[in-house]
Amino acid sequence: MSAPYVHPYVPNTAPEARAAMLAAVGAASVEDFYVDIPDALRLHRPLDLPPALVAEQDLVRHVSGLLDRNRPVAPGRSFLGSGTYHHHVPAVVDEVIGRSEFLTAYAGEPYEDHGRFQALFEYESLMAELLAMDVVTVPTYDSFQAASTALAMAGRITGRRTVLVVSDVLADRRSRVHDFVRSHLDLVDVPTRDGVADLTAVQAALDGGVAAIWVETPSRTGAVETALAALAEAAHAVGAVVVVSTDPICYGVLTPPSEQGADIVCGDLQSLGLHAHYGGAHGGFLAVHDDPRFVMELPSRLFGLATTDVPGEYGFGDVAYERTSFAVREEGKEWVGTAAALWGIAAGVYLALHGPRGMAELGETILARTRYAQQRLAALPGVVAGDDAVHFREFTVALPVDPADVVRRLATQGFAAGVPLDDHRLLVCVTEVNTADDIDALVAAVADALTEEHR
Amino acid sequence: MSLPVAAKPALRRFHQARWDEPVIFELTAAGERGVVPSQVEPGVRDSVGDVLAGLPDGLRRTAPPALPELGQLRVLKHYLRLSQENLGADLNVDVGQGTCTMKYSPKVNDRLAAHASLLDLHPLQDPADAQGILEIIWRTQRMLAEISGMDEVGLHTQGGSAAIWTNIAMIRAWFEARGEAEQRTEVITTIFSHPSNAATAKAAGYDVITIYPDADGYPDIEAFRRALSPRTAAIMVTNPEDTGIYNPRIAEWVELAHSVGALASYDQANANGILGITRARDAGFDVCHFNLHKTFGTPHGSGGPGAGANGVAAHLAPFLPRPLVVRDEDGTFRLDDDRPLSIGKVAPFYGVVPNIVRAYAWIRALGAEGLRAVAETAVLNNNYLMARVLAIPGASAPYATGRRRIEQVRYSWQDLFTDTGITSEELGVRASDYGMHYWTSHHPYVVPQPFTLEPTESYSMAELDEYADVLAQVAREARETPDVVRTAPHNQTVHHTHHDDLDDPARWATSWRAYQRKYGSGT
């Protein structure tokens, strides 16, 4: 017996239970169970770890003490985006996903875990309405994986190798996608014009070797693609698949990509009810039309409605399970595993709370405040708007000074002013948590900084 | 009847909640609202005008999304009712989800993960403002390096399979850097390793060779020798395997792989029984992964987010995903993004931060002696439960007969099936009527009529007894009242569900929207 204490997480460290169980199985000690592990592989010393904090009070003091060193900028004063966004999280969302029954469940059957199946079917269904597409899977890891899979699906469906990247996509996302698909697909960038796809250049680049065009809207600079219908028409004319990566939070007001020709729509769920969490709360969604050519290429689980022995009862189960790696290992589509189901439940609750009117108002607020911040910043002397595109939530401004200097200066005043993209451009993110007062304060602080920097 | 209350029956009279709750779209009440977002201020509207009217042609959504309209309490109530219709690990004796290590996720860790300084911390804030969480990430990396024996650890991934993918992505980059990518086209795994080892290798472009067990249930080393060649890029194996059998010749496997120039990748999803007992690097592995949501006590979230950890020996460290959290000599923590050989990003930012905090707190609450107690107790619990299960007529544990297992066992109801025609799936559904759950196995069913139990360290002797009693009862019913088993479940939210529609593209209903399109407004 090597444990000097009875640990509250490990009931059978109680000496009485331990002795009784060893006796029941006829073992002299737990060493009997490890006979298959050769002595040469045994660790003959204790692990070199910091001392245990068994008393909960000590643990809380230690971990809280570390976390207290974080200095988060108040969300209203943070204009940071670029992949993680500050949106208001309704209390009901946290309440639901904090429930033990959801938080600690895993992979029960549709009987004892009926609630999980229904909540995730409803997530799929609520997203399906927002995106105007019939098929949305149980979430994948994040938008990086969602875009990777969407493009890999396009490669499998078409048997072709080329992906035309027609938008300014988030660089980190592109890095992940590249490493994921590079055994099967080549990413070819088509430079954008004025923040959005260059339709003429895309048309010129499309040929019978193109598996997909990859549109990102809003783009990494928040530019909304306005030529999606024309891009899709051109892509479809050569048999290419149209993949759109996006943020679902804009579709209370913007036309969903499926209505402009998108075949696969993918993106992140973080905006729909998840805290920033230092970038650690991301989930990915994948949506397709109800076309077996596409559905059968999806790697993720997909819950569908079923009848039961009792009329009026909703049952649930896995749609087309045989496509998954759970069913057929490497013969399945990519793989499926633990991903982001709880975040999907959160997104479902978020959409159910907002309803059509809430999502429309939220979209309008973000569009209006984005435009307001863009106008006010661009009105400062020497500041120029990055482009003339329509922007949702993010935009760039070119500053007459190094934006990193401005960011540093504003940090001392409690602002996170944005993300410097290069020597001149600052990427600014505005959501509904940034009020007009917050924006006015930012603009005043930037104005002061520019004046100071010019001295 | 008067007091005293009669004694309880031997088995719990469980019934799952049954709220008969409609699908949320059916609850809609026109005009109701669950939340009101922050509204456009008059000053903003004066400045920018009507932004919706100003959108270019075709960009403004014409028909609003057909989301339900519900008051806040009704939304809350709906989801709370659904939650009650779900058997989380906090309520279940969750030993039936073998390979998944359903242990207790301490409540205090949930509170720490939701610390106010973390919820609104943006990942692109200056690292100087994030020293607390960066230190926790760094310390977790170092503790997992010690637990695995590896030199460096990355915590970027969201789940175990994503971490396995990261392993093969690093291996692929390693051979590219050495100019051997063209030659190394094959990955070898074993049938009792998690299917994601095979599936991620295939997704990375490799051909997969799968080794089956020998007569004793150990991975067949002669078949393995024949499979190895200069084409081999890596072996990707679990140990102990999903049978709970530890491959005693694992170091020899690694040496054989190395002898043909291949790398050895260790899926440590089953590490719970060997914490502090034996380490990946000590067996010679080049790379390994852990599931923080299995071994290190973070909750499973109804299927994620989990969190993965990738451990690598020094020669693979340059290939880890970027950025890596490092500590400078002055004790400050920063993000090292200048890693030219890195496979790049595998996920947004720095990993599943709430779960990294939970795993850190879990390890700190236990310490070295506690981790060893976890492993030893998980193994004791497993062997105790095995003795109880094997005493049930019709149950067996194929392979390595009479030998001990590590932390789980893949059992078989084949004998019971031969006697009664009742399948393992049917027995599992019936077991749920007693408030228990079990899982059969990944496919293919190499072990016939399988069920896989992993008791972890979290359950008391009394709970293990209760679980075994339920299995014994269900097996007895299969012989004595088989119709009760075949028509199960009886005590669940819903009854026997018909799966045929789920495989027919013309009939499947993948969303409420698709259901309405295919079947009108319902039935």
Image (cartoon, coloured by chain):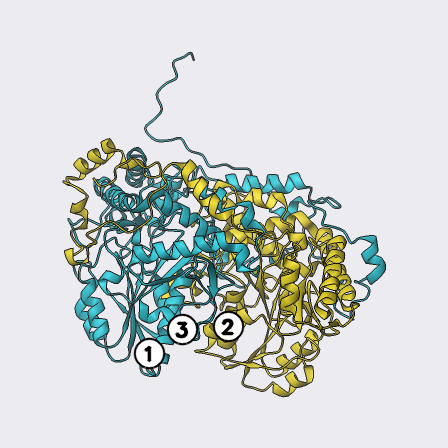
Task: Say if mark 2 contacts mark 1, CB within 8 Å.
Answer: no
Task: Please give the chain letter of the residue carrying mark 2.
Answer: A
- Locate the C terminus of chain A and report the quarter of the image it occupies: bottom right
Chain B takes which shade in the image? cyan
Q: Is residue A188 something that shows in the picture? A: yes
Q: Label 3: how many residues lie within 10 Å, few (<14), some (14-19) or many (20+)?
A: many
- What residue sits right under mark 1 in the picture? B185
Q: Are marks 2 and 1 on the same chain?
A: no
Identify the colour of chain A in the image: yellow
Residue A72: % across, % down: 58, 52
Residue A248 in the image: above or below residue B384: below
- For residue B280, side relative to residue A93 (left or right): left
Q: Which amino acid does label 1 sit on?
A: Thr
Q: Identify the amino acid type marked 3.
A: Ala
Task: Answer with mark 1 or mark 3, whichever residue precedes in sequence.
Answer: 1
Asked whether A252 or A443 is in front, the reply is A443
Is residue B523 visible in the rendered structure shown here? no
Is disc 3 in contact with disc 2, using a CB cutoff of under 8 Å?
A: no
Chain at numbered mark 1? B
Residue under the image location 23 percent in, 61 percent down: B282
Between tags 2 and 1, which lies in front? Answer: 2
Foreground mark, 3 or 2?
2
Q: What element carries label 2?
A: helix
In-image side of B409 versus A413 (left or right): left
Quadrant of res B164: bottom left
Q: Label for residue A175?
A: 2
* On screen, residue A438 above or below B27: below
> Residue B376, which numbered label?
none
Residue B204 badge: 3
